[in-house]
Image (tube, rainbow, N blue to C red):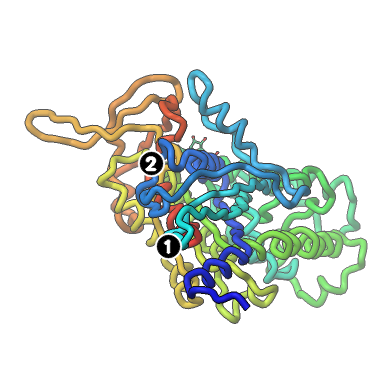
Amino acid sequence: MPTFFPRELQNLVERGRDRQLRLAVTGLSRAGKTAFLTSLVNQLRHAGLEARLDLLPAAREGRLLGAQRVDQPDLSVPRFPFDQAMAALDAKPPTWPNPTRGISELRLSIRYRPKRSSLLGSETRRLSLDLFDYPGEWLLDLPLLEHDYLSWCLIQQQTLGSERRGLMQDWLAAVEDISPEDEADEARLATIAEAYAQGLRAAREAGFSDLQPGRFLLPGDLEGAPVLQFFPLPGLDGMDPKQLAALPKRSVYQTLARRFAHYQRHIVKPFYREHFRRFDRQIVLVDVLGALNAGPERFADLSRALSALMKSFDYGKRSLLSRLFAPRIDRLAIAATKADHVTPEQHANLTTLLEALLAEPLKDLRFANVPVKALSLASIRATEARELTRQGQTQPVLKGTTLEGEDTLIFPGEVPPRLPDDAFWARQGFDFTAFRPLPRASGALPHIRMDAALDWLIGDKLR
Ligand code: GDP
């Protein structure tokens, strides 16, 4: 029998181990998922060359040798459109990549030298990194699993504030003269469901986030499918649940209740079972600055939506999720994106504001012992930080080019370190300008703290 030195033995064991990691990126639409994943792939492909990844030890120590795209294992999931995204960023003038609208995947094979090199010296290893991108809106449907149709209708009615009522006007008008006991008319239900979906999309456009069902906003390949033809019936609060349950099978109420149950069973649960359950790690991106820009009602709405979304990461023994299946995510990051919209001394505030926004879900995660890190980052930095001295006073400013092509030098404002109160909203509005991406000077995209995010998400696998 051969004799091994302990170090060699350990190396053998590690080499034999399946070095594979499934990392998922999510966030509500426009949170910056497409930009993040594009930058992540770009940075890893340029690691060891001109990518600036000092906060990732494997890169700092010169052990990260690069990454290649390889064929993904699951052919039924669309491929993340990395080349198209880079082509948009390299256009003249540069433009932002088109966002993805459903789930997509990309597999990278990362080559690195382990920290404690073996007796042979120049050993290299590979880590197979499966990257997934999916809409955070889909996670808003987890709480929906806790309801039956009746309780869902009652909850939905409560979320309709005055501004949202305005946006849902067409649907409210259409649903007004339909009664639970009416006989279901397919075409009519389809029309009302479409008005409901349109209302949700209008609310989304206006900056609202706490919107259900999630697939109505981003149907992916379910566009127009009958499974999406339901909606909550208003005015059920005064009704006797027993009488509703006894209505005939063909009634509006029973038809909608059946579709709701079908949606739960055939759309929401399979996503968790076939995808979500298999992710090892996850980053949740949040456009905190965008919500600050949109004002108090939208900011409060984002907070509600995030609490709902974060329920998918609550693995406490009694949580809904762990009753459905045994989750496996062992590490989570939450990131405030587009940090290049504010001057660098505001970044710490941006992180504490994100933590304040997620205070309740973070408590649950700590209790459930899921390691989580909060940070602020810019996947693709579009501005440069400068200082401006005027009348002896030095002020930090940002230099960038607006989407319309105008060069500007601005101080975009202060980020509150905690949840803004009424006095704060009254005192100060926000006006963060949207910038055009910078022309790419070298192969690697400019960023802020992508390396810190990478370190938290994959750094331990590159030791
Ligand atoms: P998705 O819908 O979550 O995939 O969001 P995207 O990645 O498409 O981002 C939405 C928009 O946010 C982009 O079109 C950009 O205008 C902006 N954006 C995203 N990331 C950054 C960033 O790092 N810096 C800046 N300045 N803007 C960003």
The alpha-carbon separation of the residues under discs 2 and 1 comes to 23 Å
Q: What percent of the width, then of the height, locates residue 131? A: 60, 50
The amino acid marked with disc number 2 is Arg
Which quadrant of the structure image shows residue 389?
top left
Which quadrant of the structure image shows residue 354?
bottom left
Q: What percent of the width, then of the height, locates residue 347? A: 31, 48
* Residue 189 left/right relative to 451: right
Residue at 55% across / 61% down in the picture? 281
- Whether residue 458 is situated above or below residue 37 in the rendered picture: below
In the image, is the residue at mark 1 within 8 Å of ligand 1 by its beta carbon? Answer: no
In the current view of this chain or complex, which residue is farthest to the left? Answer: 392
The residue that mark 2 highlights is 52
* Residue 14 left/right relative to 288: right
Front residue of 139 and 258? 139
In the image, is the residue at mark 2 within 8 Å of ligand 1 by its beta carbon? Answer: no
* Residue 78 left/right relative to 445: right
Residue at 80% across / 77% down in the picture? 242
Front residue of 234 and 18? 18
The amino acid marked with disc number 1 is Arg
Q: Earlier in the sequence, mark 2 or mark 1?
A: 2
Residue at 34% across / 58% down in the picture? 352
Query: For numbered disc 1, what is the local secondary structure?
Result: loop
The residue that mark 1 highlights is 116
Front residue of 314 and 253? 314
Binning the other alpha carbons within 10 Å of mark 1 as few (below 14), some (14 to 19) or many (20 upward) gives few
Front residue of 455 and 328? 455
Q: What percent of the width, then of the height, locates residue 360? A: 45, 69
